[in-house]
Each structure stands twice: as C-alpha cells, then as structure tokens.
Image (cartoon, grey):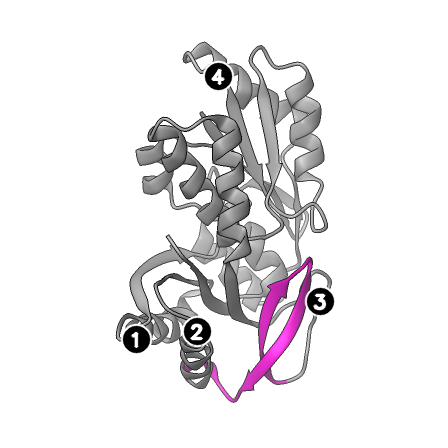
Amino acid sequence: MVCTDSSSLLPPPIAEALGVSVAPVGVTLDGRAFEEGVDLDVDEFYAQLRLGARATTSQPSPGRFALLYEAAAAAGATHVLSIHVDERLSGTVGAATLAARDARVPVTVAGTGTASFGVAICVMAAAESLAAGRTVAEATERIRTVVAGLGNVFVAGGAPGGRVPSLPGLPLLSFVEGATRPVGSATDLLDAAEAMARYVCGQGEGLHVAVGHAAVATRAAADALAEQLAQLRTVVGVTRYRVGPSVGAHTGPLSFGAFWWRP
C-alpha cells in the first residue's frame, strides 16, 4: 500500500483509483487552523490570501501517520510505502519515520528530493509498480529513476518569501536540488505561459507534462500553457492538477506552472 500527504497535490480521484492514502497537511489562515482537503475550501483560501491574509503550514503529525499505517494494516496491507516531500523543505519524512517505528506492518519511508506535484508523480509511479507485482524495493528504485528525469518551471505571483523567494516582476522559477532558482522572466501571466511552454520544449522528447494552477485568476493562463504543451511533438500527454493551500501558502495565489517526466 502507498501513503503520501496532501502537499503532494495528488488529485483525489487518482488517489482513490490507485488506493493511495493521504495525510492532510495543517494550514493556518490568519490564526485559524484547518486541514487541507478536509475543512478548507481552496477558492476561499486564495481569496483570503489576495486580501492580505497570512498563511502557514505544518506537516502531518506522527500520530496522523500512525492512523494511516494502522488503517493500512487493518485493511490487510503487509507493507506500506510512505512517499513525501524533500526533507530540506519539511519535517514530513521525520514525522512519518517516527510513526513507522511502531507500525504493525513494515513501513518504508521515502523522501523524494522534490516537492508539490513532483511528489504526486513519484506516488503514481510507485503505486503502478506495486500494482504490477513489483516489490517495495523495486517501487522505491522506480521513484529514484523518475526523479532523475523530473523537471519543473513555475511562477509564484504573490509569494510571501521564505521557501519561495519574493522577487520583483514575474520571474520564471524552478525547484532544483532543494532550492528555488530563477530561470527566466515574464511580463504577465499569459506571457509566462508562453515562456514556460518554450522552456519545456527544450527539455527533450517523450515527456508527460502536468500543469497546475492556484487561484482562479490563474486558470486561463494555465489553460493556455496546457494547450500549448499539448501541441508540442515532444509531449506525449498532459495532466491537470490544482495547487492546494499547503503549496499555495508558499508560492502565492497567482502561481501556476508545469512538471514534466518520462513515463
């Protein structure tokens, strides 16, 4: 069985189809505590951010992971593969590791070295490997292979600083080796969509791409990016996802972008 947390941005229909359990990330909005995917409306969250609300996030507790692992054991799982965000960004791997020590079944905790939907890509690859009869060790190795060919580009309009730097203008950014780095610039959201499409075009052949957006105001630009990518001969498929509060709290309400990998 595979577990992850909601900062992976794994769409609920995909999680359900693959049998993946998801631990909610804690989000605090102007002092009010919520759990992502449980009692926090995404559109209302971004509306409040655009009005100046402050948001912080906290990884699921060891107790929350312990509940997931116990549920997996009760459902008949003989081993759990728990897949999470880069340890340089969050203590999620540490919390999962603490819970794994007392689990009734063996739990392998895998940090991915990536973040956001990059983790979801790893989760999907690992779940598909296990469904095909591969071992947990082979599924974990599959994660490493996927990450080696994984890339991303995004804009972070309204980012508050911290994990994602608050920079002037609308720079194109990429999360690489634990840090966010500028890789270009744009004048507005639609210009950013065109610039990101050109950036992805230079990443080689046989790419599957995922496009995500935060606030509703970024939907049109994300649509334009997805349409442009779908027309590239180097792209074999396009997936869509929503940037949830656990990531949007750091990237800002006007964030959108793309991940790519080789299936």
Q: Are marks 3 and 1 in contact (CB under 8 Å)?
A: no
Q: Position of residue 241 (x, y in %)?
A: 39, 55
Q: Which residue is mark 1?
A: 232
The three-letter amino acid code for the residue at tag 3 is: Gly
| Sequence-first disc among 2 and 4 | 4
Toward the viewer: 140 or 226? 140
> Whole-percent x and y of residue 225?
36, 74
Query: Residue shown at 39%/35% (left/top)?
Result: 129
* Amino acid bearing label 1: Leu
Left/right placement of residue 23 relative to residue 232 reads right
Instruction: Say if 127 sits above or below 210 in the image.
Output: above
Dots 4 and 1: beta carbons under 8 Å? no
Q: Earlier in the sequence, mark 3 or mark 4?
A: 4
Mark 2 or 4: the one toward you: 2
* Crowd rating for badge 4 (residues with CA inside 10 Å; few <14, some 14–19, many 20+): few
Name the residue carrying label 2: 200
Amino acid at pointer 4: Ala
Residue 140 in percent (x, y) is at 53, 36
- Identify the residue under disc 4: 71
Find out whether residue 29 is within the magenta segment: no
Q: Residues within 10 Å of mark 3 (few under 14, many from 20)?
A: some
Q: Earlier in the sequence, mark 4 or mark 1?
A: 4
| Image position of 187 (left or right of 26) | left
Amino acid beneath label 2: Val
- Look at discs 3 and 1 and give the one toward the viewer: 1
